[in-house]
Image (tube, rainbow, N blue to C red):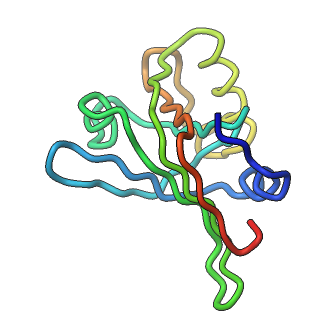
């Protein structure tokens, strides 16, 4: 299992947005996402109709980059790993509660189990720079 430093953990829990990359057989797809870093994994909300979801169904590997760009002071964490789809149950409820607390857009447009899944990125490789 990948270990994160305290600085990395503090950085990852302080940021709300990241870039999430998936791929089908021939083409990568990158998009901005809201995420939660919890228990050394990343959780991303998605919909069943998105390219991201379709790519994960076909290829359950992905990457996420969390960064703050400031010339000369760039901080970032890049993680690659395997993705598990969370559609319901205790883990879904736990993560949904965290999303509900953290993001206004979730409170404005709530959803239930099986209406939209979370993608859990389980880190296999990590790189960080800028004292993130």
Of 53 and 56, the residue lying toward us: 56
Q: Which residue appears farthest toward the left when viewing the image?
A: 26
Location of residue 10 by image quarter: bottom right
Position of the N terminus, as image quadrant, is: top right
Q: Work out whether 115 lies above or below 104.
A: above
Q: Residue placed at 33% from the left, 42% from the top? A: 52
Location of residue 24 by image quarter: top left
Q: Is residue 24 left or right of residue 12?
A: left
Percent position of residue 88, x then y: 53, 13
Q: Work out whether 124 lies above or below 57.
A: below
Percent position of residue 23, x then y: 27, 47
Q: Which residue appears farthest toward the bottom when viewing the image?
A: 72
Percent position of residue 69, x then y: 62, 79
Q: Which residue appears farthest toward the top when viewing the image?
A: 89
Q: Residue placed at 65% from the left, 11% from the top? A: 90
Position of the C terminus, as image quadrant, is: bottom right
Of 6 and 18, the residue lying toward us: 6
Percent position of residue 86, x then y: 50, 21
Of 96 and 54, the residue lying toward us: 54
Q: Residue placed at 56% from the left, 40% from the top? A: 123
Location of residue 100 by image quarter: top right
Q: Work out whether 58 lies above or below 2.
A: above
Q: Residue placed at 48% from the left, 58% from the top? A: 19
Of 125 and 121, the residue lying toward us: 125
How many numbered markers are drawn? 0
């Amino acid at each position: 299992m990948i270990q994160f430093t305290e600085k990395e953990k503090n950085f990852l829990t302080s940021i709300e947005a990241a870039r999430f990359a998936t791929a089908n057989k021939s083409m990568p797809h990158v998009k901005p996402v809201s995420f939660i870093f919890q228990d050394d994994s990343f959780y991303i909300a998605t919909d069943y109709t998105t390219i991201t979801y379709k790519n994960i169904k076909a290829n359950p590997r992905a990457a996420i980059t969390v960064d703050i760009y400031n010339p000369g002071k760039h901080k970032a964490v890049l993680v690659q790993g395997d993705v598990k789809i969370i559609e319901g149950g205790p883990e879904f409820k736990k993560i949904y509660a965290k999303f509900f607390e953290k993001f206004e857009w979730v409170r404005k447009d709530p959803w239930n189990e099986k209406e939209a899944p979370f993608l859990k990125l389980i880190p296999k490789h990590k790189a960080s720079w800028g004292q993130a």
